Amino acid sequence: MKCVICKQGETRVGKTTMTLERGSFTMVMKSVPAQVCQNCGEAYVDEATTKALLKTAEREAKAGSQVEVRAYAMA
């Protein structure tokens, strides 16, 4: 797909690091599967992966974590 940010690059299968923040909670998820622009590096994460990330972040935030860093693993 054509990158909507730089409008020049094409995306390719790759991995990215996602940072999610809410209040005092921060979660960094590494090696998240994504489509990554070969020109500017913008990453696009699909809906299923996004839902999984948000579910994990919600669970960790409710558990009282303040900072969580982990590698992405499909459930």
Image (spheres, rainbow, N blue to C red):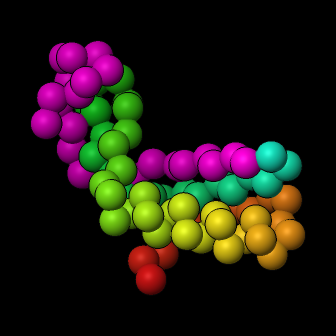
Q: Name the quadrant of the C terminus.
A: bottom left
Q: Which one is nearer the viewer's eye here, 73 or 51? A: 51
User: Of all residues shown, which one is farthest toward the left?
Assistant: 1
Using residue 66 as the reference point, say whether residue 19 is left or right of it: left
Foreground pick, 56 / 1: 56
User: Which image quadrant for residue 55?
Assistant: bottom right
Please provide percent x and percent y for residue 62: 77, 71
Does residue 70 appear anywhere in the picture? no
Q: Position of residue 59 (x, y in %)?
A: 68, 74
Q: Is residue 71 left or right of residue 24?
A: left
Instruction: Determine whether, in the image, residue 26 is placed left or right of residue 28.
Output: right
Q: Residue at x 86, y 69 (%)?
A: 64
Q: Is residue 62 visible?
A: yes
Find residue 73 and report its horizontal and vertical position in percent: 48, 75
| Identity of the residue drawn at 39% across and 63% down | 49
Q: Is residue 31 magenta?
A: no
Q: Residue at x 62, y 47 (%)?
A: 19
Q: Position of residue 66 (x, y in %)?
A: 85, 59
Residue at x 42% of width, y 77% of height: 74
- Residue span colored magenta: 1-22
The quarter of the image holding the N terminus is top left
Of residues 56 and 17, the one drawn nearer to the viewer in this rendering: 56
Relative to 71, say whether 2 is above or below: above
Count of numbered badges drawn on the protein: 0
Tell me if residue 51 comes above or below residue 28 in the rendering: below
Q: Is residue 45 left or right of residue 67?
A: left
